[in-house]
Image (cartoon, grey):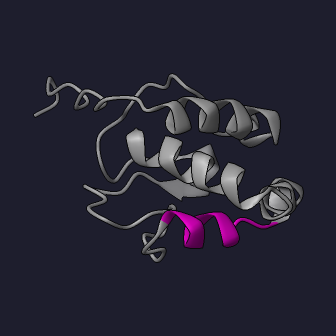
Amino acid sequence: MRATLVPPRGPISFDASEGEKVFNSIGCETCHKNTFVTVPAGTSINGGAFKVPTALAKRFMHDLRSHSLDDAIQRHGGQAASVRSSFNALSTTNKTRVLRFLASL
């Protein structure tokens, strides 16, 4: 299974493409990079602050307790609190675009 590639992205809609721009403009890319190296499930990284989960299914965040993308965004705190506030201040259209971008990944 280690050689299994990440599934390809589906069609990228206009909203998803615009959402990526908004995602980057509000600071999400500070932590969420567009490229990364994976390690086996169960590996502790960042000094043990995060343990790589097994398949996420339809759960989000590092502890798998968020059941929607919006819920995951709302649970960001600490260093990401200002980015969460920036997301919350977006128009409904731009919030939807960010969520469509995230769903396209």
Apparent side of residue 23 relative to residue 40 in the rendered image (left or right): right
Measuring from the top left, give residue 48's x and y in whole percent: 57, 55
Measuring from the top left, give residue 86's x and y in whole percent: 86, 55
Q: Which residue is drawn at 78% across and 67% down?
A: 77
Viewer-side residue, 94 vs 99: 94
Classify 47 as above or below 81.
above
Q: Residue at x 39, y 47 (%)?
A: 43
Measuring from the top left, give residue 81's x and y in whole percent: 84, 62
Apparent side of residue 33 relative to residue 9 in the rendered image (left or right): right
Is residue 75 found inside the magenta-colored segment of the image?
yes
- Counting labels gives 0
Q: Residue at x 37, y 67 (%)?
A: 59
Classify 84 as above or below 33.
below
Which range of residues does the magenta coloring cover?
A: 69-77
Classify 21 as above or below 40.
above
Q: Specify the quadrant that holds the N terminus.
A: top left
Q: In which quarter of the image is residue 39?
A: top left
Viewer-side residue, 45 vs 23: 23
Apparent side of residue 5 relative to residue 15 in the rendered image (left or right): left
Q: In which quarter of the image is residue 4?
A: top left
Viewer-side residue, 71 vs 79: 71
